[in-house]
């Protein structure tokens, strides 16, 4: 058993709740810019006074509508400015926010709203209102439905005009640190989503210690970030709270508008999941190859990786520095410009990034600070810091958190970030919080300096017929690094050998078809039988197999004609593969690998 602890750097009084900071800032520094809001092709500044006023007006509307302290109010929307306003308005009314992914089906909406007992819901568009309407009859607790695009937020704010400032202040301060702030339903890679009870103290203490403590070198004066991950996910939500607490300028975007928004907003740091960084790398590589500059990009990538590795072990030599300077002009500067030109740091979480990508981006001039956590740990449990980074690990515990490795290798967490339990599920709560520790279900190791490395998922360890334990994650991460591969699932539990299901990345296939003289109209189903494509996938499998022992290597694989998707039930909204769903739906393909 091994353990590493970091004392809290920021102590938070027990009476503190999430609304304290934005309203205090509005009083103390009313003209400070806290948000930049998308307005056509430009960004308009929102001051601390304006933000608090808008939050207060909506909160008064909620009070007038009969929302009481502790009532649950659901919020179903993409990441946008209104999400943040509504989040804080619900808290200012003393209520509990229940986020719902904008991609959720009516059945998922019914489960989350019904299980949480939500009294009201904000739904973004007509599509989301229709999903709510489809199940409205069975939701006995749901008294209010407000459409964001329908103009209901403005009408709600107007309806609260008679609620006094004194009433708002009383309601806003009635909730304390230990009180429930939000119910965040897990993405549900197995079974139905469970509502994680996250308190005001969980969010405020974790945000202040993670952002102002562990990442203080990132969040300096003049810092800004552009959120584009779903705010229904705890990772983006914690960053939202963190930047509000630290006074960092916040902007909102989404994947379809991300590239032009990065160029016009120009953030200083970003947060993303590894798949985003993989896409950036693969896209740049494919573009270079298509333009006849594939060899230059390959040399630039190798130099960036070597440069980063040299930074980790000492200082780069004179020759390496010279090559790096040349490629900074030819390649790296263009990559930095693609994300706005000012990004120095990016925080990555949700899955393993991989050492190669970590070193590449650091060599390019964008240091990716990989972290680790779960919904149950209010997002971060550990994170790399600019002054304390080991590429390939997920960093040290954030201040106020202790990480322990149990005898069986499971990662256990204790501290300011650990949730209170699962809503309406005492049995699951007792199991997860046994012995005063949160049992993550992940396997890992701690080095002498307290840096954590995640090695697999406890329940996802495959045991072959020969008794060999195989962690599928390292192989899957390595395969997804290929520009041609979108997703993969390693299988082999109880079988004689390890196999894999592989899906193709349509974005990566376009340039590949052009380079190899294939018709642009060739479909994924046709390509998966193409000898050249099969040879490229074979090479990616061989590369992945070099990272494991012979007994753990992939012996056979099947290239599928379709990709795993959230719509088909194979992916969570946070882009994790639902292993049980894929195994069930592709049972015949898996069986064919062994017959």
Image (cartoon, rainbow, N blue to C red):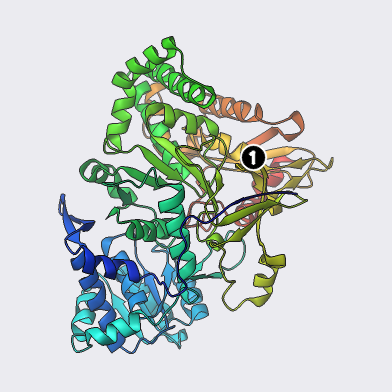
Q: Is residue 234 left or right of residue 553?
A: left
Q: Is residue 321 above or below residue 339?
A: above
Q: In this view, does 169 lie above or below 256?
A: below
Residue 348, position as x, y percentages in the image: 46, 45
Question: Mark 1 highlights which residue?
Answer: 500
In the image shown, does 335 or 509 lie closer to the viewer? Answer: 335
In the image shown, does 50 or 512 lie closer to the viewer? Answer: 50
Residue 139, position as x, y percentages in the image: 45, 84
In the image shown, does 211 or 342 lie closer to the viewer? Answer: 211
Q: In this view, does 150 lie above or below 329?
A: below
- The residue under the point 45% across, 46% down is 273
In the image shown, does 357 or 502 lie closer to the viewer? Answer: 357
Q: How many marks?
A: 1
- The residue under the point 27% across, 35% down is 341
Q: In this view, does 32 lie to the left or right of 374?
A: left
In terms of secondary structure, where does tag 1 sit?
strand
- The residue under the point 44% across, 67% down is 105
Question: In the current view of this chain or complex, which residue is farthest to the top?
Answer: 319
| Residue 62 seen anywhere in this rendered image of the structure | no
Question: In the current view of this chain or complex, which residue is farthest to the right?
Answer: 466
Residue 407, position as x, y percentages in the image: 78, 51
- The residue under the point 57% across, 56% down is 401
């Amino acid at each position: 058993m091994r353990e590493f602890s970091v004392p809290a750097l920021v102590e938070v009084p027990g009476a503190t709740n999430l609304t304290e900071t934005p309203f205090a800032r509005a009083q103390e520094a009313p003209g400070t810019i806290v948000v930049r809001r998308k307005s056509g092709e430009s960004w308009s500044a929102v001051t601390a006074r304006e933000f608090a006023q808008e939050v207060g007006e909506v909160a008064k509307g909620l009070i007038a509508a009969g929302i009481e302290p502790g009532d649950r109010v659901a919020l179903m929307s993409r990441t946008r400015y209104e999400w943040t306003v509504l989040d804080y308005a619900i808290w200012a009314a003393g209520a509990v926010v229940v986020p719902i992914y904008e991609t959720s089906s009516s059945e998922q909406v019914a489960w989350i709203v019904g299980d949480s007992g939500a009294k009201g819901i904000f739904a973004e568009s007509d599509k989301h209102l229709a999903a709510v309407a489809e199940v409205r009859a069975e939701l006995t607790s749901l008294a209010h439905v407000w459409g964001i695009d329908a103009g209901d937020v403005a009408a709600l704010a107007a309806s609260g005009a008679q609620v006094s400032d004194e009433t708002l202040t009383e309601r806003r301060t009635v909730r304390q640190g230990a009180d429930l702030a939000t119910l965040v339903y897990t993405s549900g890679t197995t079974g139905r989503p469970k509502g994680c009870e996250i308190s005001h103290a969980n969010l405020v203490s974790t945000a202040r210690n993670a952002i102002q403590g562990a990442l203080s070198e990132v969040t300096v004066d003049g810092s800004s970030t552009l959120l584009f991950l779903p705010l229904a996910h705890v990772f983006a939500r914690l960053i939202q709270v963190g930047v509000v607490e630290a006074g960092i300028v916040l902007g909102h975007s989404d994947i379809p508008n991300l590239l032009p928004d990065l160029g016009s907003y120009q953030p200083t740091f970003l947060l993303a999941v590894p798949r985003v960084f993989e896409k950036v790398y693969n896209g740049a590589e494919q573009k270079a190859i298509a333009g006849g500059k594939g060899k230059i990009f390959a040399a630039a990538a190798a130099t960036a990786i070597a440069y980063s590795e040299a930074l980790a072990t000492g200082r780069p030599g004179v020759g390496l520095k010279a090559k790096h300077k040349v490629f900074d002009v030819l390649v790296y500067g263009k990559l930095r410009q693609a994300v706005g030109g000012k990004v120095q740091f990016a925080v990555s979480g949700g899955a393993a990034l991989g050492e190669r990508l970590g070193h590449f981006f650091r060599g390019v001039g964008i240091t990716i600070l990989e972290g680790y956590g779960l919904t149950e740990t209010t997002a971060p449990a550990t994170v790399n810091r600019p002054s304390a980074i080991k590429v390939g690990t997920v960093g040290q515990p954030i201040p106020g958190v202790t990480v322990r490795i149990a005898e069986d290798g499971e990662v256990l967490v204790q501290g300011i970030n650990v949730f209170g339990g699962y809503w309406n599920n005492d049995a699951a709560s007792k199991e997860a919080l046994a012995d005063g520790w949160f049992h993550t279900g992940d396997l890992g190791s701690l080095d002498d300096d307290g840096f954590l490395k995640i090695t697999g998922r406890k329940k996802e360890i495959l045991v072959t017929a020969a008794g060999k334990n195989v962690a599928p994650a390292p192989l899957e991460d390595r395969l997804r690094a290929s520009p041609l591969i979108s997703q993969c699932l390693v299988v082999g539990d109880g079988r004689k050998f390890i196999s894999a299901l592989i899906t193709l990345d349509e974005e990566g296939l376009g340039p590949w078809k052009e380079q190899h003289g294939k018709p642009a109209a060739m479909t994924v189903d046709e390509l998966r039988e193409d000898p050249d494509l099969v040879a490229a996938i074979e090479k990616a499998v061989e590369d992945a197999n070099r990272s494991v022992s012979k007994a753990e290597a992939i012996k056979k694989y099947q290239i599928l004609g379709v990709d795993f998707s959230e719509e088909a039930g194979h992916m969570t909204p946070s882009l994790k593969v639902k292993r049980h769903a894929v195994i069930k739906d592709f049972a015949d393909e898996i069986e064919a690998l062994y017959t």
